[in-house]
Image (cartoon, rainbow, N blue to C red):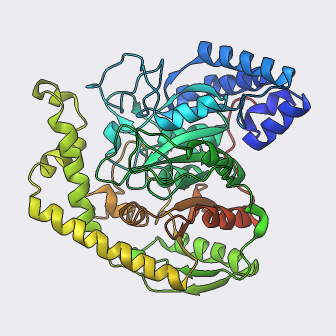
Amino acid sequence: MTSALHRLSAVELVAGYRARRFSPLEVTKACLAAIAARNGELNAFLVVLEEEALAQAQAATARWHAGTPQGPLDGVPVTVKDLCPTIGAPARHGSRTSSAAPGTVDAPCVARLREAGVVLLGKTAMCEFGWKGVTDSPLLGVSRNPWNPARTCGGSSGGAAIAAATGMGALHVGSDGAGSIRIPAAFCGVYGFKATFGRVPAWPPGRVALGHYGPLTRTVADAALMLGTIARPDARDWTALPYVPGTDYRRDLGVGVRGLRIGWCPTLCGARPDAEVAQLTAAAVCVFADAGASVEEIASPIASPREHFDTLWAASMAQILRRIPAREHDVLDPGFRQLAERGRAVTVDALLDATHARHVDGAAMNAFHERYDLLVTPQMPTTALAAGEDFPPGRAMTSWLDWSPYTYPFNWTQQPAASLPCAIASDGLPVALQVVGARHAEALVLRASHAFEAARPFAMPPGPGPA
């Protein structure tokens, strides 16, 4: 059994610790072996904290043997995205312009995980400052898809998705400002969950109220378990939502979807998925109907916010660029620098117009959810792009937002949204659905995701390393 420990879910690990079938130290060694086997090929990690992880695992093992676990995730191996401040590890943001010094403070989600007794394996790769939907950076180079290393893993939480898919830990912290959890989850065939804005406390403050932290995992139950921990309060985030003590997102996972009203929208905001993706996702959404939900194909409930979203996105990147000394600009990703320079030209009127448009779209989605419990779309219009490329060839695209039309609208409206694997395309790469709920409806999105997973269990990629 020990050779497959790195592939077990967090729920299975905690049950195994409790029954003393294996220990956190054994599991941590298995995960570190998986990292050693594949990280050189896939480039998932900024830093691996092997010595620290083994010490934490030894302490967790002692607690379990004494019958005094520290919390619901005691001894579970976890990774954290590069940008999260973390005691003892740097937060480089994928950039050569950032400090390599170990951090002295934990972000809220990292602090909550430590309080629960997790084993921190390391920090995972991202693109520079999270500016695009793939993971390559001047700092770390290109990160690759575990299903096919010639393809991208997506981004910007690409390292976390690679780690989830390959057993380099059980739980993985990602962040999502325009799709950065859901894009790599879809391309790597894992589960990615972005809660309502403010559900998971964030610090330092995010850019223009777009960024969300959340889990990338191999199962829905693991995401629910993790969310219950990282959504606990932290006074540093004044935008955080109220926390209800005792909240357990696993409680209603098995209720199912019977009676739910689901709007199926493959053409959200004018999106046009590739023919095979359209076919596979249309077949997959029938799983909800077979489980008793009412599924209706609908027109897009909002027009594309692309122009206004781009205004906020470019302006937020310009804010980052202003803090970097001019002498260091030459080592930045040229695409980031170009976007940030464009953001410097954004006017106050454009920002105010974008803010007004955002209020209109948010209200429209509130009205939509008075009629429908959930919105379901394809997650990505295509399977993973070639590794090292920002755009699919031959499509005349000028921004990565053009090939990810389903993701950023729900950062814009701050709604909970999940990417769940639904099929494997003819090129051998994963295809995913997106399940979107009304604001504050995390439990319902997780419940629907779990019902789908029960009908179509998620497949993980084959590959070298521990079996």
- Image x and y of residue 414, in percent: 42, 62
Nearest the eye: 359 or 411 = 359
Nearest the eye: 222 or 454 = 222
**Residue in the picture at 77% in, 39% down:** 8
Q: Quadrant of residue 165?
A: top right
Task: Tell me if residue 105 comes above or below residue 349 in the rendering.
Answer: above
* 415 sits to left or right of 307: right
* Quadrant of the frame with the N terminus: top right
Task: Tell me if residue 139 comes above or below residue 270 in the rendering.
Answer: above
Q: Quadrant of residue 302?
A: bottom left
**Residue in the picture at 72% in, 30% down:** 74
- What is the count of numbered marks? 0
Nearest the eye: 451 or 154 = 451
* 279 sits to left or right of 338: right
* Quadrant of the frame with the C terminus: top right
**Residue in the picture at 68% in, 78% down:** 286
- Image x and y of residue 317, in percent: 23, 45
Nearest the eye: 327 or 424 = 327
Q: Is residue 42 visible?
A: no
**Residue in the picture at 90% in, 29% down:** 21
Task: Tell me if residue 194 comes above or below residue 274 in the rendering.
Answer: above
* 89 sits to left or right of 412: right
- Image x and y of residue 307, in percent: 23, 67
- Image x and y of residue 216, in percent: 58, 46
Q: Is residue 135 visible?
A: yes
